[in-house]
Image: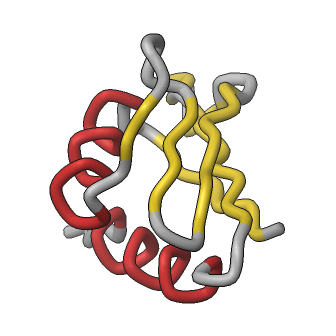
Amino acid sequence: MTRLEVRNIRADEVAAIVRAELRGEGDTEGRAFRGDGWSLAFVPGEPAPVGRYRVPVLFIDIEGEREPEVAALLRRKLMRGGG
């Protein structure tokens, strides 16, 4: 299993990427998705402190034979640059 941690990105934004890029089918609550050779689940984390603010944390647990491919795609799509 691969676990990705993303901060300050809502689960519905990640779900849209999963549906569009991976053609994943989700459960009715949008917390778990499955595709050909992979599955993933969203696990909410405790908000993380960033200075005096707290940002949402979302863990994405990925499993299956295509796990490395799915993890790499999500890392690329969810990467954010700062400036």
- Between 29 and 75, the one lying in front of the other is 29
Relative to 48, does residue 25 appear above or below in the rendering?
below
Residue visible at 41% across and 31% down in the picture: 11
Q: Is residue 2 left or right of residue 68?
A: right
Q: Is residue 24 left or right of residue 58?
A: left
The quadrant holding residue 45 is: top right
Relative to 9, does residue 40 appear above or below in the rendering?
below
Q: Position of residue 46 (x, y in %)?
A: 74, 24
Q: Residue furthest top?
A: 29
Q: How many marks?
A: 0
Q: Position of residue 27 (x, y in %)?
A: 48, 23
Relative to 66, does residue 26 appear above or below in the rendering?
above
User: Please, which colouring scheme is shown?
Assistant: secondary structure
Q: Position of residue 35 (x, y in %)?
A: 46, 59
In the rendered image, which quarter contains the N terminus?
Answer: bottom right
Residue visible at 26% across and 72% down in the picture: 81
Q: Residue furthest right?
A: 1
Q: Position of residue 67 (x, y in %)?
A: 64, 78
Relative to 27, does residue 24 appear above or below in the rendering?
below
In the rendered image, which quarter contains the C terminus?
Answer: bottom left
Q: Is residue 82 left or right of residue 36?
A: left
- Between 35 and 44, the one lying in front of the other is 35
The quadrant holding residue 77 is: bottom left
Q: Residue furthest front?
A: 36
